[in-house]
Image (tube, rainbow, N blue to C red):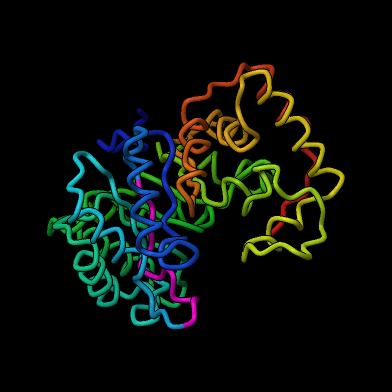
């Protein structure tokens, strides 16, 4: 178990990503994945109110609805659920009234009284940050949210959020969710980790497996014949530099009897301030690798080797 920042949230050190629920995993497949994750010891689920509005026929909130139905059906003990606001088509942005309405809508879809961890999904510079910070603080004061977090915020804006919260006496954020993995390191390590260390924030990185590239499945930039909707996002990393990372992951993983994916997640867990990487599974068969990645501890020299082999990989969007 691991503590998220300065909060009282003590969670399994791997968060199951809910972005696939209602997208590449239907209700039954999602239930099966959630069952397998919890049966294997997992207890931390990540979603957002906008998942998966991009799918034709969806309107946003499908992932939360599936998770809510699963929670009602299974009644699991001790599961921590994180969700986010700012991108739902009906609740766009971070104006105070919108944050409140979006939170109430998420609570209804999830079927819970309180959101454990509530993220500002993307910064909204059209709204004064004081207004957004106050809105999140009010949600905590009113018992709708336990803890506050930010996602996709710059270090400067995180620092500004904390300063406003301290000045106005509202709850501080406890976590930050950045795009971070072995092929996307530079910005996070240069700016986000230092501010996380400064304020005691826990990192909960998304794209932990680089859209599947860090599973070792994609070893060419040619996506012809690939049926996965994420194939293009993964295959772009299959450069000479990217494949050297895969080779190192495979060799280190073999020494532990672990997969490339599990080894990649173990590297991420070894980085400063990282509490729990986020990774998704659209089938039950993909869950064991995620669980193994939360339990695999790499030796210092193995972490150093992966640091070196990925050091010069350019940051990519």
Looking at the image, how many numbered discs can be counted on the residues? 0
Vertical comparison of 256 with 310: above or below: above
Vertical comparison of 286 with 90: above or below: above
**Residue 239 percent coordinates (x, y):** 84, 50
| Picture residue at 35% right of the left edge, 28% below the top | 1
What is the magenta range?
45-56
Q: Is residue 259 magenta?
A: no
| Picture residue at 36% right of the left edge, 57% below the top | 119
| Picture residue at 40% right of the left edge, 57% below the top | 29
256 sits to left or right of 202: right
**Residue 142 percent coordinates (x, y):** 12, 59
**Residue 95 percent coordinates (x, y):** 33, 75
Q: Is residue 52 magenta?
A: yes
Q: Nearer the viewer, residue 185 or 173?
A: 185
140 sits to left or right of 31: left
| Picture residue at 46% right of the left edge, 44% below the top | 204
**Residue 292 percent coordinates (x, y):** 50, 30
Name the image quarter holding residue 183: top right
* Main secondary structure along the magenta-highlighted residues: loop
Name the image quarter holding residue 193: top right
43 sits to left or right of 22: left
Quarter that holds the C terminus: bottom right
């Amino acid at each position: 178990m691991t503590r998220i920042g300065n909060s009282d949230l003590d969670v399994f050190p791997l968060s199951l990503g809910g972005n696939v629920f209602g997208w590449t995993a239907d209700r039954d497949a999602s239930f099966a994945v959630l069952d397998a994750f919890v049966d294997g010891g997992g207890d931390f689920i990540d979603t957002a109110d906008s998942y998966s509005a991009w799918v034709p026929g969806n309107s946003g909130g499908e992932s939360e609805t599936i998770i809510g139905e699963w929670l009602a059906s299974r009644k699991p003990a001790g599961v921590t659920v994180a969700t986010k606001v700012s991108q739902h088509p009906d609740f766009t942005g971070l104006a105070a009234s919108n944050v409140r309405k979006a939170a109430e809508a998420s609570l209804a879809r999830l079927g819970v009284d309180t959101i454990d961890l509530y993220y500002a999904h993307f910064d909204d510079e059209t709204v004064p940050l004081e207004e957004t910070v106050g809105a999140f603080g009010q949600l905590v004061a009113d018992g709708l949210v336990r803890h506050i977090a930010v996602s996709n915020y710059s270090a400067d804006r995180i620092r500004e959020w904390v300063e406003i919260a301290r000045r106005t006496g509202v709850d501080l954020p406890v976590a930050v969710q950045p795009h971070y993995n072995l092929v996307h390191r530079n910005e996070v390590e240069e700016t986000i980790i230092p501010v996380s260390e400064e304020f005691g924030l826990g990192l909960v990185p998304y794209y932990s497996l680089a859209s599947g590239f860090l599973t070792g499945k994609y070893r060419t930039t040619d996506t012809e014949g690939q049926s996965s909707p994420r194939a293009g996002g993964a295959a772009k990393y299959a450069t000479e530099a990217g494949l050297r990372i895969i080779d190192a992951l495979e060799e280190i993983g073999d020494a532990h009897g672990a997969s490339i994916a599990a080894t990649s997640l173990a590297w991420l867990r070894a980085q400063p301030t990282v509490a729990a990487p986020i990774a998704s599974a659209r089938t039950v068969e993909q869950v064991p690798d995620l669980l193994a990645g939360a339990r695999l501890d790499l030796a210092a020299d193995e972490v150093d080797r992966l640091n070196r082999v990925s050091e010069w990989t350019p940051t990519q969007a």
